[in-house]
Image (cartoon, rainbow, N blue to C red):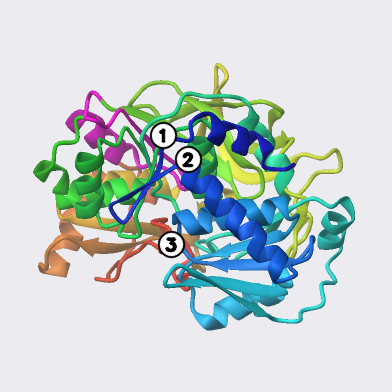
C-alpha cells in the first residue's frame, strides 16, 4: 500500500543494478526479495502496526529493505547512526521507542523496550494507521530537536518520475538528505553506491571505480576534499553533478571548486528535517542564489526570515514548542535575501553576531578567512562584551603547525583589506580538533559536538 510505487518500479527493472555495497552488486529483484523476507520477519515477531521502532545502522541493502517493510507495516521509525549509548537512550525516551533493532553480521536483531507511548503526535499517526518517521536535528547549534512526520506524505513526491544518476549516498541514514537520495534513486530505477567510509580519499576512489555521476554532500566535505587534494589521484570525469547543502556554502570554497572542476554542475540544495528536501535551481554554477519550489511548496519572507508551507511538513516536534505560524507556515529561522525570485541563505538568525548594533554574518567572515592557504577550518561566533554587546571570535584549525602569534597578525592584516573593522575577529583561538560532526556539518555551538 504505502510502498506500491516503489515495488512497481522495482518490478519493471528487476534485472537492473539497484545497489552496490561492499563491492557487491544487488539487483532490484534482490531488493524485492529482501523486502518480502523482512515483511515475514515482522509478522513472525508479531510487530504490530503503529509500533515505534528504531533502526541502529547505516545504509546497506538489508537496512534499506527493512525500512521499506516497516513503512508497509505502518510502523513509526527512528533511524539512528553511531551515537553514544547515553544519547541513544535520550533519543529513545523522547521518541518513545518500543522496539530497537540492529543488524549483527547482517542478521536482524530485535529487542523489546516495553515503552508505553504517550505523545499526542504519535497517537495521531497510530489512529490514522500511517507510517511515521522521527528525525533528530544534528544539534550543531543547540539541543537536538525531534521532528515527527507522516511518512506517507514524505513519500508522495517520489511518485513523480525524475531523471536519475549513478549516485553515491554520501549523506547519512539518520538524515533526511540521505533518505531522500535513497528513495529518489530507487524510485527512478537508478543505481545507488553505498559506503561507510567518508574520507575524501575513499570517496574519490569510489567515484572513479564505479563511474559515479552524482555526489550529494556538504560544503564541509568539499573543503576537506580540496585541502587534501585527493581528487588529483583519481579520474573523476564521470562526475556530472555535485549537490551541496545542510549548511551555508562559503563563497570561497565554491569558487575554488568551480575553477578546478569547470565541467561539474554545482547545485545548491535546501532542506530541513521539518519540511524535507525542496526542489532547487541555482542561479549559476558559482552562485549562492537559488530558487526554491516543488509540488505543494509555498515560500514567503517575513522580517527577512524564510517561511515555508509544504505538503510534507512535519506534524510537529516531540520535545520543542510549535514552530508554525497561526496560518500554518513553518518558520525556518533562516535569514535570507531576495532577488528576482531567487533566495540567498545568509544563515540562522540565532547565529548572527550583533556588534554595537551592526549585524555580522559568520559565514561572510569565514569565507574571507578560508582564502588564507594556511587555514583548514574556521568557525566564527560571537562572545558577549560589556561595551559592544558582542565581539567577533574565530576558532581556527590550521593545515600545518606554525607560530600562532605571527599568524594572528597576518590574519588581522588580511581581514583589514576585505572586511569592515567591526567584522574583524577580536579573539582568535587555535585548535587541532575537527570542527564538524559525523554528518560533515559545521558545529556552530562549540560546546555541542553531536
Of badges 1 and 3, nearer the viewer stands 1
Whether the residues at callouts 1 and 2 have beta carbons within 8 Å, the answer is yes
Q: Would you say residue 204 sits in the magenta stretch?
A: no
Q: How many marks can you see?
A: 3
Q: What label does residue 295 carry, if any?
A: none
Of badges 2 and 3, nearer the viewer stands 2
Whether the residues at callouts 2 and 3 have beta carbons within 8 Å, the answer is no
- How crowded pointer 3 is (Cα within 10 Å; few <14, some 14-19, many 20+) is rated as many
Estimate the x, y position of residue 350 in percent, counting from the top left: 58, 55
Q: In 3D space, how far apart are the residues under numbered discs 1 and 3 (Cα atoms)?
A: 40 Å
Q: Identify the element where label 1 is drawn.
A: loop
Read off the residue under disc 3. Answer: 443
Which residue is more in the foreground, 119 or 183?
183
What residue range appears in magenta? 238-263
- Label located before the other in sequence (1 or 2): 1
Read off the residue under disc 1. Answer: 16
Q: Is residue 128 above or below residue 311?
A: below
Which residue is more in the foreground, 105 or 177?
105
102 relative position to 2: left or right:
left
Q: In 3D space, how far apart are the residues under numbered discs 2 and 3 (Cα atoms)?
A: 38 Å
Looking at the image, which residue is at 28% across and 39% down?
A: 252
Read off the residue under disc 2. Answer: 28
Looking at the image, which residue is at 39% across and 30% down?
A: 165
Q: In 3D space, how far apart are the residues under numbered discs 1 and 2 (Cα atoms)?
A: 6 Å
40 relative position to 49: left or right:
left
- Say whether residue 143 is visible: no
- Label located before the other in sequence (1 or 3): 1
Q: Is residue 41 above or below residue 112?
A: above
- Residue farthest along the right direction in this orientation: 127
Estimate the x, y position of residue 313 in percent, counting from the top left: 72, 43
- How crowded pointer 1 is (Cα within 10 Å; few <14, some 14-19, many 20+) is rated as some
Amino acid at each position: 500500500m504505502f510502498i506500491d510505487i516503489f515495488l512497481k518500479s522495482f518490478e519493471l527493472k528487476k534485472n537492473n543494478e539497484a545497489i552496490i555495497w561492499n563491492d557487491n552488486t544487488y539487483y532490484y529483484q534482490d531488493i524485492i526479495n529482501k523486502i518480502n523476507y523482512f515483511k515475514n520477519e515482522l509478522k513472525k515477531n508479531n510487530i504490530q502496526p503503529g509500533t515505534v521502532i528504531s533502526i541502529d545502522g547505516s545504509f546497506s541493502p538489508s537496512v534499506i529493505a527493512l525500512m521499506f517493510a516497516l513503512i508497509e507495516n505502518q510502523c513509526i521509525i527512528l533511524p539512528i547512526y553511531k551515537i553514544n549509548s547515553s544519547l541513544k537512550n535520550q533519543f529513545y525516551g523522547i521518541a518513545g521507542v518500543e522496539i530497537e533493532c540492529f543488524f549483527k553480521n547482517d542478521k536482524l536483531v530485535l529487542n523489546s523496550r516495553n515503552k508505553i507511548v504517550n505523545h499526542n503526535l504519535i497517537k495521531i499517526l497510530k489512529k490514522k494507521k500511517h507510517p511515521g518517521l522521527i528525525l533528530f536535528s544534528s544539534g550543531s547549534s543547540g539541543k537536538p530537536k525531534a521532528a515527527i512526520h507522516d511518512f506517507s506524505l514524505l513519500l508522495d513526491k517520489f511518485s513523480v518520475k525524475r531523471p536519475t544518476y549513478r549516485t553515491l549516498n554520501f549523506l547519512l541514514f539518520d538524515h533526511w538528505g540521505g533518505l531522500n537520495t535513497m528513495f529518489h534513486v530507487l524510485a527512478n530505477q537508478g543505481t545507488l553506491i553505498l559506503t561507510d567510509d567518508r574520507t575524501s580519499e575513499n570517496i574519490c576512489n569510489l567515484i572513479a571505480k564505479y563511474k559515479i555521476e552524482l555526489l550529494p554532500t556538504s560544503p564541509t566535505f568539499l573543503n576537506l576534499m580540496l585541502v587534501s587534494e585527493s581528487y588529483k589521484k583519481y579520474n573523476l570525469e564521470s562526475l556530472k553533478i555535485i549537490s551541496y547543502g545542510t549548511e551555508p556554502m562559503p563563497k570561497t570554497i565554491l569558487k575554488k571548486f568551480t575553477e578546478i572542476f569547470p565541467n561539474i554542475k554545482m547545485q545548491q540544495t535546501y532542506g530541513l528535517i521539518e519540511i524535507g528536501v525542496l526542489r532547487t535551481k541555482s542561479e549559476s554554477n558559482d552562485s549562492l542564489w537559488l530558487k526554491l519550489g516543488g509540488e505543494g511548496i509555498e515560500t514567503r519572507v517575513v522580517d527577512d526570515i524564510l517561511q515555508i508551507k509544504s505538503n510534507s511538513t512535519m506534524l510537529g516536534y516531540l520535545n520543542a514548542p510549535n514552530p508554525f505560524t497561526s496560518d500554518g507556515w513553518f518558520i525556518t529561522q533562516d535569514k535570507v535575501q531576495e532577488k528576482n525570485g531567487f533566495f540567498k541563505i545568509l544563515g540562522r538568525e540565532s547565529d548572527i553576531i550583533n556588534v554595537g548594533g551592526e549585524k555580522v554574518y559568520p559565514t561572510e567572515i569565514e569565507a574571507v578567512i578560508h582564502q588564507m592557504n594556511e587555514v583548514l577550518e574556521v568557525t566564527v561566533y560571537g562572545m558577549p562584551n560589556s561595551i559592544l554587546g558582542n565581539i567577533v571570535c574565530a576558532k581556527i584549525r590550521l593545515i600545518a603547525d606554525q607560530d600562532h602569534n605571527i599568524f594572528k597578525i597576518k590574519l588581522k592584516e588580511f581581514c583589514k583589506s576585505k572586511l569592515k573593522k567591526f567584522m574583524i575577529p577580536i579573539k582568535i583561538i587555535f585548535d587541532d580538533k575537527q570542527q564538524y560532526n559525523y554528518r560533515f556539518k559545521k558545529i556552530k555551538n562549540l560546546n555541542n559536538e553531536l
